[in-house]
RNA sequence: GCCGCAGUGGCUCAAUCGGCAGAGCAACUGAUUUGUAAUCAGUAGGUUGUCGGUUCGAUUCCGGCCUGCGGCACCA
């Protein structure tokens, strides 16, 4: 038999039995490979090989190995649960990006993280027994017999086609495609992380099962590293930092409606003024439209029918009104207010629109998900022949903005759904334009077929923060619906009325969410241009050096630099500590030395160096940091 | 909205089995005159989210509601 070994495989003489070779490798390196790739497809190590197969071992340190290990660990969890809770019925238990979960119907039993210790103990015990994972192919009927007591597995089997495979370790058998690690002994460094409810098959009409999340690594160090990352995420949580740094709060009197504190408002205003600057440069016209508009308008737009559950409504003099959940109708009324020639297009209308949406209570999450937020919205009306350039222009702007904040992103193109309006040809054409623009941008992009809105295809921009998590912020959506409903038009070169193409787009998405992302991404240590306080001034001896410090403070303020003095009757170390805790980029220390030489001594957040400069030099240093949007 | 968990001075947390609600930080007052991550002492601060129930007695046990947290569903 001829088997070709790739990568990390031990080379054996021709004609050797691949199965034996693998066994030998296991003996040599018992804990290494967890699976193998046979002709590119992921398989159990125990899979028998055929003549000519190309084989590559999958090590637990590889991404595929991580997935296999975690998938197996989900089975181990299920086995342990089946011992401790004999009534438990199992749903799905897959590996996910950072670990695994298993959805379990515990019947009457209620599970909380207090039960993890006992479950983990049982898992450890079963891992120690080193039970082999045995794969078995069965017919549908046999499978139904095996899982007769479990309605979830039965339902799943009913949906499967072709061969059904089961995996068994010890007394526990599960429906599964595999592959798995050779035996439970390969699972050593795992931890259960959280419990949650999850609908069976992700459908809110179905029963809710209990989901247990966990993760499994190939070494204790890596597991601990991951737990450290989780801790770090908690420390960088914008809800915690927002409280500590005094940026915003949400009152019980207004769930989901954020209050911006003075320091948070500075952040918001800085973002807005940056937004204005670049949009003015790019030919956007800023408008403001009313927050409350009549029911008739929302009937034309279709929101009254389709979005009503998410809208706050009110009555004024017995007439129905709604608080805007989106800015589009206002922008369209503004477009329609004046007559447009084909020569005037594109018309780019921007609006920082404060919108209200009734989000489900369980969806609320700090600034990431709120019920009132400011969209950095823009609606662009253009001719079809201008569409491609417009989209490229928007993407150039997006790229510029995200770069300023050091956020990397990927793009998702959503295409025509089954339920669509408009001409199919124009859908095809605009999807092609969006795809070309993505390629042109040079950024990673993927296609989400059929996920576009009924009114047009879209590009979503998913930002990646420093912790590796992604958030949707920017979006560019083509709209073939609203211009039609509102009878938008321009006059073309023949004097005819023509319906323009309309684009919705946001860069930040929601300024609130964007502030949340920035807060976490910077860990609260904002770059100088955004920092609510840019300079903290500390007189060494408040009584002696206050006058000089106040003079420097006044000079900084005169230059528009956000500076604060701490002349409290505390030791310098104490005041320095507070300045660092508030993550202020520059701290100035002013004492005898500085007073005599007319200088300032500064220290940069996160650094210990003490640098002395003349006041003028220091001011230019900061002005330069602000102008270039550099960290310091 | 759904499943599970939680709510104690401004903040972070403690209080055994149901038995007088406590600490650190912050605040305030005073002392200290300080050169780069916490000077010392004192004072004040609470209807334990809220409403109801059980009990001689509830922060503690039970129920309703509110809010938050972890997810799910939904979504910027």
Image (spheres, coloured by chain):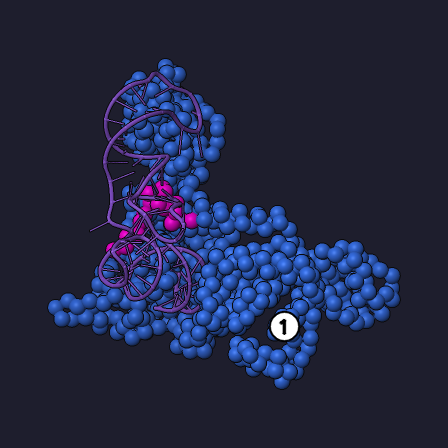
Residue A238 lies in the magenta stretch: yes
Residue A84 visible in the picture: yes
Residue A227 lies in the magenta stretch: no
Q: Residue at x 70, y 70 (%)?
A: A134
Q: Is residue A216 above or below residue A621?
A: below
Near-viewer residue (A154 or A362)? A154
Spot the residue most to the top. A596
Q: Residue at x 40, y 74 (%)?
A: A454
> A297 left or right of A229?
left
Residue B52 in percent (x, y) is at 23, 62
Quadrant in which residue A93 is drawn: bottom right
Q: Which quadrant is home to the N terminus of chain A? A: bottom right
> A208 left or right of A139?
left
Q: Secondary structure at mark 1?
A: strand
Q: Residue at x 30, y 70 (%)?
A: A309
Q: Colour of chain A?
A: blue
Quadrant in which residue A374 is drawn: bottom left
Residue A87 in percent (x, y) is at 52, 72
- Which region is colored magenta? A237-253
Spot the residue most to the left. A317
């Amino acid at each position: 038999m001829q088997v070709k070994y790739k990568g990390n495989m031990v080379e054996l003489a021709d004609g050797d039995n691949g199965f034996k070779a693998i066994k030998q490798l296991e003996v040599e390196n018992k804990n290494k490979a967890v699976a193998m790739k046979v002709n590119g497809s992921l398989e159990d190590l125990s899979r028998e090989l055929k003549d000519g197969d190309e084989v590559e071992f999958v090590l637990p340190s590889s991404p595929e190995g991580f997935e296999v290990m975690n998938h197996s660990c989900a089975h181990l969890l299920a086995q342990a649960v089946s011992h401790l809770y004999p009534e438990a019925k199992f749903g799905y238990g897959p590996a996910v990006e950072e670990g695994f979960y298993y959805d379990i119907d515990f019947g009457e039993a209620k599970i909380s993280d207090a039960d993890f210790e006992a479950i983990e103990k049982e898992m450890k015990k079963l891992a120690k027994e080193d039970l082999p994972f045995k794969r078995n192919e069965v017919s549908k009927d046999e499978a139904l017999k095996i899982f007769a007591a479990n309605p979830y597995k039965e339902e799943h089997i009913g949906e499967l086609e072709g061969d059904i495979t089961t995996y068994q370790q010890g007394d526990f058998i599960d429906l599964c495609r595999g592959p798995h690690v050779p035996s439970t002994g390969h699972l050593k460094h795992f931890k259960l992380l959280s419990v949650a409810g999850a609908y069976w098959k992700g459908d809110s009409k179905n029963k809710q099962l209990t989901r247990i999340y966990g993760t499994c690594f190939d070494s204790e160090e890596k597991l601990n590293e991951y737990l450290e990352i989780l801790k770090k995420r908690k420390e960088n949580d914008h809800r915690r930092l927002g409280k500590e740094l005094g940026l915003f709060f949400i009152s019980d009197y207004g769930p989901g409606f954020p209050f911006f504190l003075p320091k948070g408002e500075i952040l918001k205003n800085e973002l807005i003024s940056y937004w204005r600057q670049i949009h003015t440069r790019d030919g956007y016209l800023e408008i403001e439209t009313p927050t409350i508009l009549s029911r008739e308008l929302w009937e034309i737009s279709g929101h009254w029918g389709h979005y009503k559950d998410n809208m706050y409504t009110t009555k004024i003099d017995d007439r129905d009104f709604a608080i805007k959940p989106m800015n589009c109708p206002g922008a369209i009324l503004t477009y329609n207010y004046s007559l447009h020639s084909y020569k005037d297009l594109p018309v780019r209308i921007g609006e920082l629109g404060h919108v209200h949406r009734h989000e489900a209570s369980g969806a609320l999450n700090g600034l990431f998900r709120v019920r009132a937020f400011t969209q950095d919205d823009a609606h662009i009306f253009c001719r079809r022949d201008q569409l491609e350039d417009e989209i490229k222009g928007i993407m150039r702007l997006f790229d510029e903005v995200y770069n300023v904040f050091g956020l990397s992103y990927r793009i998702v193109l959503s295409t025509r759904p089954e339920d669509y309006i408009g001409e199919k040809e124009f859908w095809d054409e605009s999807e092609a334009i969006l795809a070309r623009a993505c390629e042109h941008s040079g950024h990673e992009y993927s296609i989400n077929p059929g996920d576009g809105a009924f009114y047009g295809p879209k590009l979503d921009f998913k930002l990646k923060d420093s912790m590796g998590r992604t958030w949707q912020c920017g979006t560019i959506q083509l709209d073939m619906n609203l211009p039609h409903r509102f009878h938008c038009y321009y006059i073309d070169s023949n004097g005819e009325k023509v319906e323009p193409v309309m684009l919705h787009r946001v860069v930040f998405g929601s300024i609130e969410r964007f502030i949340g992302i920035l807060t976490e991404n910077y860990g609260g240590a904002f770059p100088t241009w955004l920092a609510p306080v840019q300079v903290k001034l500390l007189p060494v001896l408040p009584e002696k050096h206050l006058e000089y410090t106040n003079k420097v403070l006044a000079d900084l303020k005169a230059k528009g630099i956000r500076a604060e003095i701490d002349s409290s009757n505390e030791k310098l170390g104490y005041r320095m500590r507070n300045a660092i805790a508030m993550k202020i980029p520059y701290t100035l220390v002013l004492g005898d030395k500085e007073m005599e030489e007319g200088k300032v001594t500064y220290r940069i957040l996160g650094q210990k160096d003490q640098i002395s400069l003349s006041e003028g030099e220091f001011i230019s240093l900061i002005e330069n940091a602000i102008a270039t949007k550099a960290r310091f």
